[in-house]
Image (spheres, rainbow, N blue to C red):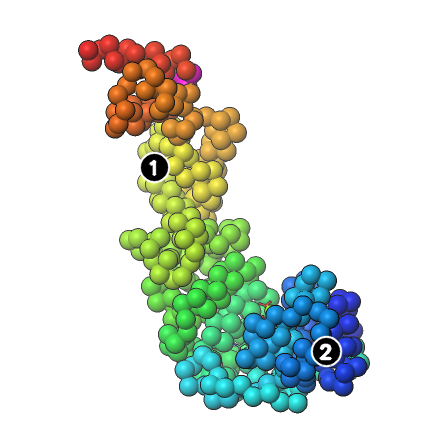
Amino acid sequence: MPVIHLPASVSDILSRLAAAGYTAHAVGGCVRDSLLGRPVHDWDITTSATPDETKAVFTHNRIIDTGIRHGTVTVMRDGQPFEITTYRVDGAYTDGRHPDEVTFTGNLSDDLARRDFTVNAMAYAPSDGLIDLYGGREDLRRGLIRAVGDPLRRFTEDALRILRAARFAAVLGFFVEEQTLAAALELRGRLAMVSGERICGEMNKMLTADFAAPVLRAASPLLSAAWPCLSAEAFCASADVVSALPARLPLRLAAVFAQSLPSAPAVTLLLLRQSRSTAEEAAAILSVAQTLSVGGQGRAEKLSLLGKYGLSVCTDACLLAQAAGLLPGEAAQQYAYDFARWQAEGTCCKKSDLALTGADLLALGIPSGEAVGRLLDELLRLVMTGQLQNTRTALADHVRRRAEASR
Ligand code: ATP
Ligand code: MG
């Protein structure tokens, strides 16, 4: 029997519930990750106590009622939140996503039966050891994501589980078991019933996972059902590129989008419910990678890319261009080196780097208005092309000469 090392606060919560006459176990992801030796980020607890009974046990702790309708009470211990959920069975699902009602039950096995995958349906308490009614431990050993019960029924109840299967496979480096995968493929159209936010959450976790590439290859029709603006072929084709890139979300999104280039990637990403900063960064990475791949830029053009987008976007664009074969590796590495060197040397690449400001130009007698911006643009171009030194004297001399010439 495996022994799971519970944090002191979790043991204490379990024993307090037990002392009050209830059964209680750690359950779900924390049991799965403990058995795998992976770090556990949330310890969820499942109990026979109803939410009111749970609250009565923890009167001395701060309690948050967020999920109370679904039986979840959040108890704060040592500054950390712990979700304690009453054993429940889910009623009928008519919207393909949420149970119409949840019913509390005194029975742990009912609660485990409603959980999505065998590896997520195990419970543990020091007094009882591991409760594994669906062969979760064996599936962990074999590296399988298998639905609890009939996969067709489970995916029909809640279509988000289709994508969760792909996500857990990518995070854990597992395969989706054959019948579970067949059911997911068959019912993938039901992903249209799931909210964009929930889809985005799962897709982002999948894309930034260590084992995203095999899932991009094997589950591409599912992924395309989740995000129909991208074809299954595009997901499949991005697998090698994604696996060659660090696990940064905007970079990996750019890699997937590079396969099928929508006309306005930032807008498309916003429609997929990405945050504004992620959407803009991914679009910027794509845009710089494409510009570099066309080639023919001189030093000034590359400096202006650095000025406009910043070092991290430019570096990621080089990584993407290399991984996607838009540029030969040597060229991409040379560009990345240049960007980093210019940044380190403080090479002037944007107006705010110029040794003269707009206020300085006004002081030199340039009339306020558009002329100031235009003149700063001109100074920047001359500095970046090496025709002017970026010093106050050189820039001011140029401004004066120009003013005299136009008199
Ligand atoms: P992680 O938090 O690492 O992403 P997790 O397994 O804790 O993984 P959560 O989404 O936090 O996943 O859910 C906690 C548990 O609740 C799961 O382990 C599973 O038992 C159950 N669960 C979550 N979502 C569903 C669902 N859509 N259908 C059935 N059971 C679910
Ligand atoms: Mg969790």
Q: Which residue is mark 2?
A: 57
The amino acid type of the residue labelled 1 equals: Gly
In this orientation, which residue lies closer to the viewer: 177 or 256? 256
**Distance of mark 1 from mark 2, alpha carbons?**
68 Å
Find residue 59 and report its horizontal and vertical position in percent: 71, 74
Which quarter of the rendering shows the C terminus?
Answer: top left
Find residue 175 and report its horizontal and vertical position in percent: 55, 72
Find residue 23 and report its horizontal and vertical position in percent: 73, 84
Q: Secondary structure at mark 1?
A: loop
In this orientation, which residue lies closer to the viewer: 254 or 398? 398
In this orientation, which residue lies closer to the viewer: 1 or 20? 20
Seen at 57% across and 59% down, the residue is: 210
Q: Residue most toward the left?
A: 407
In the depicted structure, whether residue 295 falls above or below residue 279: above
Q: Which residue is mark 1?
A: 295
Check disc 1: other Cα within 10 Å, few if <14, some if 14-19, many if 20+: few
Q: Earlier in the sequence, mark 1 or mark 2?
A: 2
Check disc 2: other Cα within 10 Å, few if <14, some if 14-19, many if 20+: some
Asked where in the image residue 363 lies, by quadrant, the reply is top left
The reply to whether residue 387 is in sight is no
Residue 334 magenta: no
User: Cβ(mark 1) to ligand 1 < 8 Å?
Assistant: no
Find residue 361 and report its horizontal and vertical position in percent: 33, 19
The amino acid type of the residue labelled 2 equals: Val
Seen at 52% across and 58% down, the residue is: 208
Residue 388 magenta: yes
The answer to whether residue 2 is left or right of residue 239 is right
In this orientation, which residue lies closer to the viewer: 386 or 115? 115
Ligand 2 falls in quadrant: bottom right
Q: Which residues are magenta?
A: 387-391
Dominant SS in magenta: loop
